[in-house]
Image (spheres, helix red, strand yellow):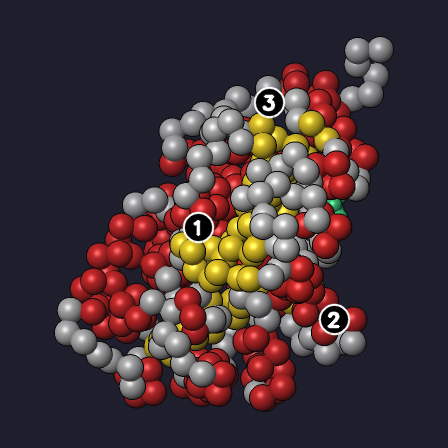
Amino acid sequence: MTDASRRYRSVPGLAELGDGRIRYSERMMPLLAALGARFGAERPFAGLSVAACLHVTAETAVLIRALRAGGAQVTLAASNPLSTQDDIAEALRARDGVAVFAKAGVDRLAYYEHILAALDACADGRGPDLVIDDGGDLVSTLHTERPRFLAGVRGGCEGTTTGVLRLRRMAAEATLAFPVVAASDTPVTRIVDNTHGTAQSVIDGLLRASGVLLAGKTVVVAGFGACGAGIADSARALGARIVVTEVDPVRALDAVLRGFRVLPMADAAPLGEVFVTATGSTEVITAEHFAVLRDGAILANAGHFDAEIDVRALAAAAVAVETDVRPHADAYELPDGRRLLLLAEGRVVNLVAAGGHPPEVMDLAFGIEALALAWLAASAAKLAPGVHRVPQDIDAEAARLVLTALGTKLDTLTESQRSYQANWHLGS
Ligand code: NAI
């Protein structure tokens, strides 16, 4: 641990508190537990230095412990100071000897200083062998502020769609100096994260902010993609009647065949009592819809940007706004007396009004990243600089390890089944 990372050592008992929370999450993260044991035996990161820029949470700490079991020296900076949990940072420093450069609520300047410190603390100032990033700030700082480290980097992992977009732009300009695996979009993460994790936490955020009973309500879900389909299923399971809006005929057909009513937003607007947008697009609920929404309609967004509900138009249409009628709920009063309830100011409702993803979801996301880092450690010399997909067998391996931990067994193809599938003569 470096002196700089000790700067934030604080309150007695903080490390114990953080350690207890890490161990609580650990029990819900079977994939990382299995990988920690495997890495301990195989030591894929022996002698390697990993610079990480991640939300400093209990789940991240479980990942870091697994990487360290595999022999990695890890330094950690926060990928967002607002999500830093100081007790976790302190537990990692005090219990694991990790150089953690993070403190809740620090300003922008300190945020970037921390990223630089995490890079500088790697391998006694020689820089990292591997990086793991969440949003692209560490990789971009590495290229702009510490280009002397670039030659030593074998590769990295990026865990967000936003970060992957930044990396692709760097790759298009031929600036990206090493291979990076885009861990945010694999078949497994789409199922576990976008569909199940997001659905649960969006409903959680919606309920916490509004307190509404969903049973018997008409819930309009805009966008029937990975997120929207999960939200629609979860709301229906709680007794809501679902209306889906879509622009893609294939997704709309899927929604119809799963028993959902599909309507254009203009027709859904006067029917809905609760609205959730999950399109990744913009201006999905606008002034023309506010004009016909029912009194008391609740508006929430699950998409990445706060552009899906036209909040500016809502503010312009309102004669009064009562903020914080409940935590993360503002009531907009329209000239005809109707009141519309906007949750989380139109920002991502599950991140603002609920606790984000459960440990099981982060287990898979981080487990895939840990497997990808081990793969990079072994094979990066053969990979060209640029953005790479997660290899299919890593995705399948992560799913297999979770199923094993859950005690779920699968069938295996027999030799005869394999040759049947491989041979186009058979069966004809
Ligand atoms: P997706 O691409 O699978 O689904 C989006 C769906 O919206 C598509 O079916 C598309 O046809 C539809 N759509 C686009 N414009 C529309 C419009 N104007 N009206 C109705 N439907 C429209 O994307 P996915 O994975 O479901 O993600 C959706 C959004 O949620 C993205 O912004 C993504 O970044 C975000 N997201 C949020 C998470 C969270 O924790 N809240 C987690 C994962 C993703």
Is label 2's Cβ within 8 Å of ligand 1? no
Q: Decide which of tag 1 and tag 2 comes sooner along the chain.
A: 2
Point out the image quarter for the C terminus.
top right
Comparing marks 1 and 2, which lies closer to the viewer? Answer: 1
Describe the element under mark 3 as helix, strand or loop: loop
| Residue at the image position 67 percent from the left and 60 percent from the top | 317
Q: Is residue 298 visible?
A: yes
Quadrant position of residue 413? top right
Label 3, label 1: how far apart the Cα atoms are: 48 Å
Residue 209: assigned label: 1
Percent of width and height locating residue 189: 56, 46
Neighbor class of circle 3 (other Cα within 10 Å; few <14, some 14-19, many 20+) is few
Q: Would you place residue 89 above or below residue 296 in this image?
A: below
Which quarter of the picture shows residue 164?
A: bottom right
Q: Residue at x 25, y 63 (%)?
A: 18
> Percent position (x, y) of residue 147?
61, 87
Q: Please, is residue 284 above or below residue 230 in the view?
A: below
| Residue 301 image position (x, y, % from top left) | 59, 51
Q: Do the residues bearing badges 3 and 1 touch, measured as CB atoms within 8 Å? A: no
Q: Which residue is mark 3?
A: 413
Give the alpha-carbon distance from disc 2 to disc 3, as whole Å.
42 Å
Q: Nearer the viewer, residue 209 or 391?
A: 209
Direction from residue 289 to residue 33 in the image, left or right: left
Q: Residue 169 got which mark?
A: 2
Left or right of residue 148: residue 62: left
Dot 2 amino acid type: Arg
Direction from residue 298 to residue 178 in the image, left or right: right
3 or 1: tag closer to the N-terminus: 1
Nearest to viewer (mark 2 / mark 3):
2
